[in-house]
Image (cartoon, rainbow, N blue to C red):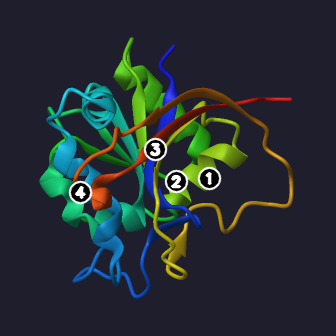
């Protein structure tokens, strides 16, 4: 069965975007700082490995806000894989490309797993991650932790209920010493432990 794995870049203090994120500034003020590590995505090291794994996923689940701020990925996130948008309401206009709108987290997970076949499913967005966690449908978290404190903006796990969610560390990869410290990142993969 396909694993559903969150892929998110976060600051050390838990932010995924700076303040005032919008369609014109999707990652908010100074939020693009979080993605400097992608400059090394073609390297054979940890960042290149993690990026290649993400691009090998066979389906995407994203929240509606993430999807819209990303300008719908022009209907194709990577390699034409199916994109499932978790939303509270389905828009009237037909979606572009391989995009499908789904309102229920469990149904969204089921459709994405089926579409991914023997591959994995990539999750984008705080809202989608929280909804899938609460529905018991998120299997793993791949967090790309950047050594910066944004201090404000949009947090990854702001709206979870006051319940413990136990995690098991599966892997920790850190970029080696590099000349550009703004490209430093630690990639952490966790399994979500179910009670």
- Which residue in the structure is indicated by mark 4? 180
Could you tell which of marks 3 and 2 lies nearer the N-terminus? 2
Could you tell which of marks 2 and 4 lies nearer the N-terminus? 2
Q: What percent of the width, then of the height, locates residue 42? A: 14, 35
Image quarter where the C terminus lies is: top right
Q: Separation of disc 4 and disc 1 at Cα?
A: 36 Å
Q: Residue at x 51, y 13 (%)?
A: 1
Q: What percent of the width, then of the height, locates residue 121? A: 41, 31
**The disc label shown at residue 131, or none:** 1
- Which residue in the structure is indicated by mark 2? 128
Q: Separation of disc 2 and disc 4 at Cα?
A: 32 Å
Q: Is residue 178 left or right of residue 13?
A: left
Tell me, yes or no, if residue 54 can be seen here.
Answer: yes
**Label 4: element kind:** loop
CA neighbours of label 3 inside 10 A, class few (<14), some (14 to 19), many (20+) = some
- Which residue in the structure is indicated by mark 3? 186
């Amino acid at each position: 069965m396909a694993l559903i794995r969150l892929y998110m870049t976060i600051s050390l203090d838990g932010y995924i975007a700076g303040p005032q994120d919008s369609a014109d500034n999707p990652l908010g003020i100074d939020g693009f700082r979080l993605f400097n590590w992608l400059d090394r995505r073609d390297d054979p090291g940890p960042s290149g490995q993690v990026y290649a794994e993400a691009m090998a996923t066979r389906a995407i689940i994203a929240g509606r806000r993430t999807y819209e701020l990303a300008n719908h990925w022009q209907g194709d996130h990577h390699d034409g894989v199916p994109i499932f948008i978790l939303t509270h309401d389905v828009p009237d206009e037909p979606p572009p490309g391989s995009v499908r709108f789904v309102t229920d987290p469990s149904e969204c997970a089921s459709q994405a797993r089926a579409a991914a076949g023997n591959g994995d499913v990539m999750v984008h967005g705080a809202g989608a991650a929280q909804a899938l966690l609460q529905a018991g449908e998120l299997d793993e978290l791949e967090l790309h932790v950047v050594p910066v404190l944004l201090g404000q903006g949009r947090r990854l796990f702001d709206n979870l209920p006051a319940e413990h969610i136990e995690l098991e560390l599966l892997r920790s990869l850190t970029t080696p010493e590099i000349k550009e410290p703004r490209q430093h990142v630690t990639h952490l993969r966790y399994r979500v432990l179910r009670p």
